C-alpha cells in the first residue's frame, strides 16, 4: 500500500513540474532577433574622445530606430587600421562606416583642400553655417568620387599658436620665430607666409623641442595643448584660430547600396543627430582643457578682427597655390 502511495505521489509531483515548466515557457521573454546587418565603424581616437563618443551615439540610434535590424560595432584606437587604410577598405565594403579627417579625404579629392585653408572662417559659427548649409552638402557629395557617402560633419576644434618667450599679438610678432608644424606642406607654407620659420616635428616630440629651445612655439587645439603638457612650457596661447579642419562621417558606397531607402533615411537622420552630440562634447572638452591650462598660468591672447584680417591677407598666395582652380568656392565661403 505504501509503495502504491509513493508511486502515485511521484507521478503527481512530476506532472506538477511539467506543468510549471510549460507555464514558464509560455511566459518567457521572447528571444531577441539576430540583426539583419552587422557593420564595422572605424575611428582612430581613444574610446573616451568626443568623436568616438559621437560614433557610439550614432550606432545606438541606428540600432534603436531599426528595431535591432542594423547593428554597428564601433572600433576605436585605429583597431581597423589608419585613416588612409580604412578609406581604402571602405571602397570594397570591408569597413562600413568611419569618422575621417578632411585632410585624408583631400589626399584623394583635391577640391577638399579648400576646407583646409588657413583663416578660411571668421569663427566657429561661420564654419557651421557653411558646413551645415548648401556648400557643406556639396562637399559631402564630392566624396562619392571615391566610392563614399558623406553623412555629417564632426568638430575637431581650431588650431592656435602658443609660444614660450613672448606672446604673438600681431603678425609682426611672428617674424623670425621657429614654429613647430605637423608634417604638411600647406601648414609649412602658412608659417612661412607669416614671416616665421616652419619646423616639422612629430607630435610626440614637441614637448622636448619646446623645452630645448629647438622651437619658439607651436600650434594646436586646446585639448592637445593641455593633454601633452605644452602649457607648462609655452605659457602664451594666441587665439588666432588659423585652421579649422572638420571631420566627416562617411559610409561605404558598397554598403549604402545594400540598404533600402528607409534605412538610408534613418542612417542620415542618426548621423546628423550624432554630429550635434559630438560637437557639444567637443566644446565641453575644449573648455575643460582651457581651464586646466589657465589654472597653471597660461595667458590667452585674442586677436582683434582687424589684426586677424592681416593674418588672412597674408594667405592670398597660398590660396592661389593650393586652390587656384576653386577660388569661386573660396569667395563664397568667405562671404557666407
Image (spheres, rainbow, N blue to C red):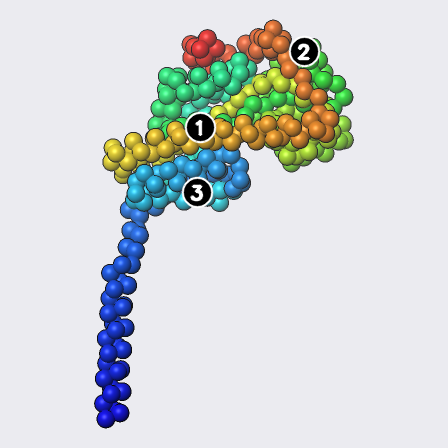
Q: Could you tell me how far apart the alpha carbons at marks 3 and 2 are, in whole angstroms?
A: 44 Å
Disc 2 designates what residue? 170
Disc 3 designates what residue? 74
Q: Position of residue 130 (x, y in %)?
A: 43, 17
- Pair 2/1: label in front: 1
The residue depicted at 37 percent of the width and 21 percent of the height is 137
Left or right of 148: which side holds 289? right
Q: Secondary structure at mark 1?
A: helix
Q: Position of residue 235 (x, y in %)?
A: 72, 25
Q: Quadrant of residue 30?
A: bottom left
Left or right of 213: which side holds 52? left
Relative height, residue 47 to residue 7 (above, below): above
Asked if the residue under mark 2 is in contact with the one under mark 3, i.e. CB atoms within 8 Å, the reply is: no
Is residue 318 in view from this perspective?
no
Tell me which label, 3 or 2, sits earlier in the chain.
3
Identify the disc placed on residue 276.
Answer: 1
Asked if the residue under mark 1 is in contact with the one under mark 3, i.e. CB atoms within 8 Å, the reply is: no
- Pair 3/1: label in front: 1
Q: Secondary structure at mark 3?
A: strand
Q: In what quadrant of the picture does the N terminus appear?
A: bottom left
Relative height, residue 7 to residue 93 (above, below): below
Amino acid at each position: 500500500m505504501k509503495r502504491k502511495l509513493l508511486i502515485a505521489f511521484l507521478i503527481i509531483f512530476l506532472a506538477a513540474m511539467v506543468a510549471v515548466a510549460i507555464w514558464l515557457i509560455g511566459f518567457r521573454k521572447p528571444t531577441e532577433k539576430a540583426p539583419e546587418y552587422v557593420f564595422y565603424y572605424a575611428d582612430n581616437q581613444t574610446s573616451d574622445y568626443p568623436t568616438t563618443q559621437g560614433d557610439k551615439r550614432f550606432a545606438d540610434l541606428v540600432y534603436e530606430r531599426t528595431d535591432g535590424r542594423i547593428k554597428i560595432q564601433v572600433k576605436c584606437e585605429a583597431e581597423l587600421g589608419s585613416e588612409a587604410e580604412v578609406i581604402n577598405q571602405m571602397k570594397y565594403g570591408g569597413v562600413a562606416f568611419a569618422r575621417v579627417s578632411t585632410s585624408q579625404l583631400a589626399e584623394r579629392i583635391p577640391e577638399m583642400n579648400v576646407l583646409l585653408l588657413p583663416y578660411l572662417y571668421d569663427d566657429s559659427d561661420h564654419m557651421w553655417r557653411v558646413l551645415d548649409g548648401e556648400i557643406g552638402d556639396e562637399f559631402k557629395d564630392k566624396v562619392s568620387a571615391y566610392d563614399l557617402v558623406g553623412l555629417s560633419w564632426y568638430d575637431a576644434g581650431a588650431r592656435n599658436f602658443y609660444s614660450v618667450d613672448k606672446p604673438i599679438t600681431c603678425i609682426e610678432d611672428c617674424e623670425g620665430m621657429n614654429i613647430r608644424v605637423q608634417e604638411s606642406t600647406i601648414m609649412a607654407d602658412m608659417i612661412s607666409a607669416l614671416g616665421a620659420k616652419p619646423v616639422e616635428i612629430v607630435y610626440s616630440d614637441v614637448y622636448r623641442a619646446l623645452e630645448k629651445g629647438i622651437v619658439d612655439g607651436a600650434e594646436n587645439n586646446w585639448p592637445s595643448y593641455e593633454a601633452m603638457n605644452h602649457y607648462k612650457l609655452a605659457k602664451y596661447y594666441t587665439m588666432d584660430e588659423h585652421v579649422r579642419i572638420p571631420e566627416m562621417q562617411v559610409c561605404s558606397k558598397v554598403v549604402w547600396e545594400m540598404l533600402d531607402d528607409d534605412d538610408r533615411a534613418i542612417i542620415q537622420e542618426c548621423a546628423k543627430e550624432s554630429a550635434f552630440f559630438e560637437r557639444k562634447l567637443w566644446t565641453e572638452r575644449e573648455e575643460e582643457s582651457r581651464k586646466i591650462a589657465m589654472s597653471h598660468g597660461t595667458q590667452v591672447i585674442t586677436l582683434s578682427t582687424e589684426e586677424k584680417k592681416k593674418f588672412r591677407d597674408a594667405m592670398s598666395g597660398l590660396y592661389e597655390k593650393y586652390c587656384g582652380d576653386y577660388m569661386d568656392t573660396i569667395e563664397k565661403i568667405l562671404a557666407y
